[in-house]
Amino acid sequence: MTASPPPGSLQGQRLLLCVGGGIAAYKALELVRRLRDAGAVVQVAMTEGAQQFVTPLSFQALSGQPVRTSLWDSAAEAAMGHIELARWADRILVAPATADLLARLSHGFANDLVTTLCLATTAPITVAPAMNHRMWLHPATQANIATLRERGVQIIGPEDGPLAEGESGPGRLSEPEQIVAALGSAAAVPPTHAGELAGLKVVVSAGPTYEDLDPVRYLGNRSSGKMGFAVAASAARRGAEVVLVAGPVQLPTPSGVKRIDVRSAAQMREAVFGAFPADIYIGAAAVADYSPRVSVQNKIKKTGETLTLDLVRTPDILAEVAAQTQGLKLVVGFAAETENVAHYARGKLQAKRLDMIVANQVGIAGGGFESDQNAMTAYWNGGERDFSTAPKTQLADALMDLIVERMNA
Ligand code: C5P
């Protein structure tokens, strides 16, 4: 009996890597190695520009396969025609994807081998952009990216940081291991779900909030943000435009997700409403219920034996979102409870006028806030669904299935 590949692995996947013409092409060499280590069978096609930076021979040595460089190579066409190659692929990965390549892909050009392969395939396409930050931020590039995302193309990166020309900004190709990890999680979404949220905007809140008492102390909680980040990643893999409003957590930004970092409940509220209009709101953050009436400028001194904090209620972001329903198709909340989970969760479903609430019991071993796995139950008017203990990434995918189901009910 053969063991099934672990979830997220690329075992046996036929991956066609299309290399674009940018300086980051050198990183694609390492990428081939990493993809093969993850179990993928890799074939490489290069644009003309890519060949200015790296030789086909390098890719041939690393992939162990002949490299395709032109539509007009009759010997290569005789061995495997380009349409055949497009059909061979289980997935096409374009890395690095230059601004020019993104523009040609978004407009459906077929004026070289790489764009022809991308147009001729029915396999899912992933692009990992890399370019100068001004080119990335240009409205033309952003429009092209939006078109590709709407079409269900997975976008990985780019990352923020130092660029080849000595400048700094968003435009760096994601690291090979990040690309491989993102491909692995994309492989976990069945193709039937791949583009189902295309054209929709999803806003997710995640993590804790910190309410400052003074310049060094704050009131916080133990939320890790892992569930919210996994939900945002799952929505992005289904083609949604995702805005993730994150409290203070040290988690990598899921690919294809726009992240807004905030600290306090008040900042979270502002960022959430700033991200609207949207189609779906998922409130996975553990928002502080109370905040100090005043955050003082100087460190509070220990003077008396006791200290009384004067706290005021924070705005209930979720309830406010649900009350203003304009354009929202679905509002989902989370409830972390230590007892009587179903009772309290259903109470919040009604009180906050939500479409769905997802409840879990915290304070039990092997699940809850800081854990990588959890068990939970979703409640809506007239129904409920149990999700048994599983990694949060898997739960997030199962939950997104239910969210899509309820939205279309
Ligand atoms: O009332 P409770 O805090 O248990 O409700 C949890 C749900 O409400 C979560 O989805 C959380 O994100 C949201 N919430 C909020 N704003 C608050 C408190 C909770 O959005 N101030």
Image (spheres, grey):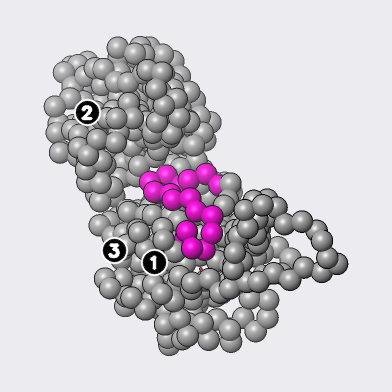
Q: Quadrant of residue 69?
A: top left
Decide if ligand 1 comes within 8 Å of the CB at mark 1: no
Label 1: element kind: strand
From the image, tell me which residue sits under label 1. 281
How many other residues sit within 10 Å of disc 2, few (<14), some (14-19) or many (≥20)? some
Q: Quadrant of residue 164?
A: top left
Which amino acid is tagged 3?
A: Pro
Which amino acid is tagged 2?
A: Asp
Query: How many marks overall?
Result: 3
Location of residue 291 in the rendering, given as x and y in whole percent from the top left corner: 59, 67
Q: Magenta segment, which residues?
A: 251-268
Which amino acid is tagged 1?
A: Tyr
Image position of 404 with respect to 352: above or below: above
User: What is the C-alpha distance between the residues marked 3 and 2?
Assistant: 31 Å
Residue visible at 15% across and 38% down in the picture: 108
In reply to whether residue 7 is colored magenta, the answer given is no
**247 left or right of 146?**
right
**143 left or right of 408?**
left
Residue visible at 14% across and 31% down in the picture: 110
From the image, tell me which residue sits under label 2. 100
